[in-house]
Amino acid sequence: MSSRTSVVIASLALLGSATFLYLRWRPPAPVPAPQAGPSLKDQVEQSQKAMARFAALPLERFTAPEATREWFMGRIADAEIDQGPQSVPPKPGEVEAVVAESAEFFYYRFCQPEAQVYIDWRARKGYRFRSDESMEKNWQIRRDAAISLERPIRPDETLEDLYREMWPFATGQKLIPNLDLHGVRPRALLDGAGSFRVQFFVTAESNVVGMKYDPASGLDVWDGLFGGTVRRWWTWPFSLEERLRSEGKVRGARVGWIVEDEADARCAMIAIWLWDTQSQRWWLWEVKRGVGPKSTQFVLEI
């Protein structure tokens, strides 16, 4: 081997070693800092701008369940039936059925003022109050009732008694003492293209969450921060967990509309329904409400 060849080989070996050491010991490339998402304030402001285009229909127009149903059913023709990656196509008649249920719920919970009328409607639909044990375990209801009503709760008072007396707090007629919490009290339904949306889904989980749309949709009417039902006083004559164990999954629907409340906030309201294969009907699971610009402290009870 010539000396020149030896030099070339030695040079290549040295270059290879240097390359290996560089690749092994070079500092890692800097990782870009994560981009901060929009703040809650920005989300709320953008949502309010998006909803400014809708016309307000005062709730005085909806003094009977028939009028409320007529408006809700009239929105089906131009409703956005979500077909995103989180959705499943509706079956024949499903849109009409779940929108009719939503209209009935909205009237009895938000349009008429009497607690007993709402209680009677719930009972007619087959719902019943949860057990005392469930309400205490999940929400310490007697403690909360004592705070709201500013008096001790007697052992003989039933959940229906407490619900009836706490109705003014849930409907926004009274503030919960010392907590600056207020109920959700809509004063208008909002009308216009894009103000009504329906989505169907299938889930195998008992923790049914709020509306999920295509992430590319951006911050608009249906995105942003939502508050859920604070306390669910009512339940069904069956167990969701048992249905999931026996059937593996349940079919659900989300019906969304826009309200304007007495604090001048325009917010999406979403009713979540689950289909029961045995009773062959939709049951109300939860209601969610968008956060308004003036306060995130609100009580949404159904």
Image (tube, rainbow, N blue to C red):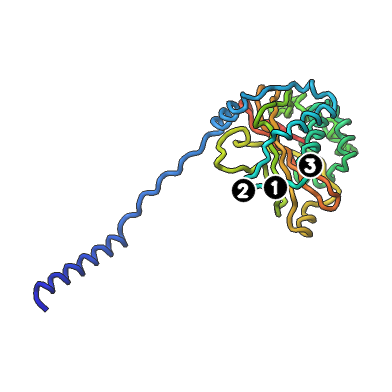
In the rendered view, tell whether residue 283 sits above or below residue 61: below
Gap in angstroms between the C-alphas marked 3 and 1: 20 Å
Q: How crowded is mark 1: few (under 14 residues within 10 Å), some or many (20 or more)?
A: few
Q: Please report the residue visible at 68 percent of the width from the left and 48 percent of the height from the top.
A: 88
The residue nearer to you, when weighing 90 against 230, is 90
Front: mark 3 or 1: 1
Mark 1 and mark 2: span between their CA atoms? 11 Å
Residue 52 drawn above or below residue 134: above
- Return the residue at label 3: 284
Q: Position of residue 191 (x, y in %)?
A: 69, 26
> In the rendered view of the protein, which quadrant contains the C terminus?
top right
User: Mark 3: which secondary structure?
Assistant: strand
The numbered mark at residue 85 is 2
Q: Mark 1 points at which residue?
A: 89
Residue 174 visible, this angle? yes
Compared to residue 3, the image places residue 237 above or below, namely above
287 or 178, nearer to the observer: 287
Q: In which quarter of the image is residue 267?
A: top right
Determine which of the numbered discs, if any, sits on residue 155 in the image. Answer: none
Pick whichever of labels 3 and 1 is earlier in the sequence.
1
Residue 132 can be seen, yes or no: no
For marks 3 and 2 on the same chain, the one whose residue lies earlier in the sequence: 2
Tell whether 27 sits left or right of 117. Answer: left
Q: Tags 1 and 2 in contact by the CB under 8 Å rule?
A: no
Residue 210: percent from left, percent from top: 67, 42
- How far is disc 3 from disc 2 in space, using C-alphas? 23 Å
Q: Which of marks 3 and 2 is in front?
A: 2
Q: Is residue 146 left or right of residue 200?
A: right
Q: Is mark 1 on a helix, strand or loop?
A: loop
Q: Which residue is drawn at 67% across and 31% down?
A: 195
The residue at 82%/44% (across/down) is 235
